[in-house]
Amino acid sequence: MKEAIIKSEKYRRQYVALNDFRSRTIIAHGRDPKKVFAAALKRGIRKPVIVYVPAKDAAQILARDLASTRPAKAEA
């Protein structure tokens, strides 16, 4: 997964919709993630990626669900 870096002050403290994690083209934006998601779907994006843009100088930590990536336990 790559970073989706959005540097514009315009989107601070908002959710933005992207085509995927490699894209830097903003499809929709706003303060309500459900509305942003719906707007991206209306624009024909089948699986939009929704990212929150934090306030300036704020850190944002994203974590992946590691449980789904663990190998299955071997049966004895």
Image (cartoon, rainbow, N blue to C red):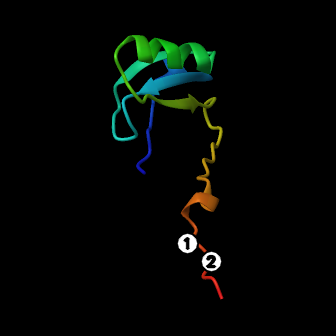
Asked where in the image residue 13 lies, by quadrant, the reply is: top right
Q: CA distance from mark 1 to mark 2?
A: 6 Å
Residue 68 x, y percent position in the rendering: 58, 58
Query: Is residue 19 positioned above or below 44 on the image?
Result: below
Query: Is residue 3 positioned above or below 10 on the image?
Result: below
Q: How many marks?
A: 2
Question: Label 1 sits on what residue type?
Answer: Pro
Indicate left or right for 43 with 50 as reference.
left
Asked where in the image residue 75 lies, by quadrant, the reply is: bottom right
Indicate left or right for 45 with 16 as reference.
left
For the point 63% across and 16% down, which residue is it?
32
Of residues 29 and 71, the one nearer the viewer is: 71
Instruction: Find disc 2 in the rendering and name its residue.
Output: 73
Q: Which secondary structure, mark 2? A: loop
Residue 60 x, y percent position in the rendering: 63, 42
For the point 44% across and 45% down, which residue is it?
3
Residue 73 x, y percent position in the rendering: 62, 77
Check if mark 1's residue and mark 2's residue have beta carbons within 8 Å: yes
Q: Residues within 10 Å of mark 2 (few under 14, many from 20)?
A: few
Question: Label 2 sits on what residue type?
Answer: Lys
For the point 38% across and 25% down, which residue is it?
46
Q: Which mark is residue 71?
A: 1
